[in-house]
Image (cartoon, helix red, strand yellow):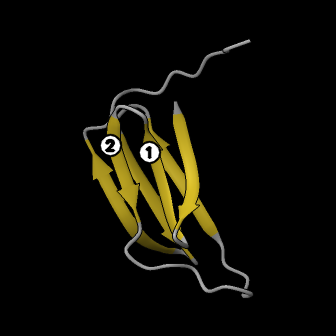
Amino acid sequence: CLNILLRSGRPLISFNWGGDCESPGAVTINRWSHVAFVHNFDQRTQSVYTNGLLSCFANGSSLYIGGSTV
C-alpha cells in the first residue's frame, strides 16, 4: 500500500512494508506550498520535494506495482 500524506505537517511518502521518506520540516499552515512525491521504480528510491527543494531521499524501498482491491 502506497501512502502519501502530511504527518504532523511533515510531507511523507511510505509503503506499509518500509522505505519511509519523511521530510524533517513541516509545511507552514495557511500558506501555499508545493510538495512533490517521487517514487523511482527502476532505482527503488523515494524523494520528497518541498517548494522545489529536496527535503527527503530514501533508497531500498520495495517495488510498487499498483493494483486493485475492488
In the image: residue 56, left or right of residue 32: left
Please tell me which residue is depicted at 47% across the width and 61% down the height of the picture: 48
At horizontal 67% and vertical 15% (from top left) the residue drawn is 68
Residue placed farthest to the left in the image? 60
Which quadrant does the C terminus fall into? top right
- Vertical side of 29 occupied by 66: above or below: above
Q: Position of residue 43 (x, y in %)?
A: 33, 37
Image quarter of residue 67: top right
Q: Residue at x 43, y 79 (%)?
A: 25
Q: Please, what secondary structure does the residue beneath circle 1 have?
A: strand
Numbered label attached to residue 36 = none
> SS of the residue at dot 2?
strand
Is the residue 27 above or below the residue 13 in the image? below
The disc labelled 2 sits on which kind of residue?
Gly
Count the marks. Answer: 2
Question: For the residue carrying disc 1, how many other residues have a C-alpha within 10 Å: few (<14), some (14-19), or many (20+)?
Answer: some
Q: Which mark is residue 14?
A: 1
Picture disc at residue 19: 2
- Quadrant in which residue 18 is drawn: top left
Q: CA distance from mark 1 to mark 2?
A: 6 Å
Residue farthest top in this picture: 70
Q: Position of residue 53 (x, y in %)?
A: 47, 76
- Residue 16 x %, y %: 42, 34
Local packing at callout 2 (Cα closer than 10 Å; few below 14, some 14-19, many 20+) is some
Q: Amino acid at mark 1?
A: Ser
Q: Position of residue 63 (x, y in %)?
A: 39, 26
Q: Looking at this view, is 70 or 23 the one in front? A: 70
Asked if the residue under mark 2 is in contact with the one under mark 1, i.e. CB atoms within 8 Å, the reply is: yes
